[in-house]
Image: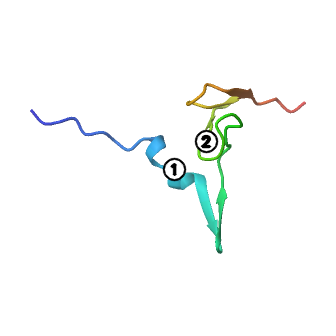
Amino acid sequence: MAKHKHKPGPSTQKYKKYKAEGTSVKRLGRICPKCGPGVFMAEHKDRYHCGRCAYTERISKPS
């Protein structure tokens, strides 16, 4: 029986969270305020959530 092959998930695609501008690098994703740089928060339609420390921020609806 063949081994199960894993597909690359969002956690392996961290290169999509950065953008190179000249000689500097800019972070595109939201960073967790508790964990610090290097830990990005997941973006859902109504909240941001950190999978490492479970910190959650609600996205307020524009009034």
| Residue at which label 2 appears | 40
Q: Amino acid at mark 2?
A: Phe
Task: Specify the quadrant that holds the N terminus.
Answer: top left
Query: Which x, y percent locates residue 25?
Result: 64, 63
- Residue at the image point whose x is 38% and y is 44% from the top: 8
**Residue that appears at 42% across and 41% down:** 9
Question: Which quadrant of the figure has residue 18?
Answer: bottom right
Q: Where 54 sits versus 11, above or below? A: above
Rendered location of residue 34, percent (x, y) = 69, 34
Q: Residue at x 65, y 74 (%)?
A: 22
Query: What kind of residue is marked 1?
Result: Lys
Q: Residue furthest left?
A: 1
In the image, 38 versus 59, the foreground residue is: 38
Position of residue 7 measured from the top left corner of the image (x, y, whole percent): 34, 42
State which tag comes first along the sequence, 1 or 2: 1
Measured in 3D between alpha carbons, the distance from the residue under mark 1 to the one under mark 2, in whole angstroms, is: 9 Å
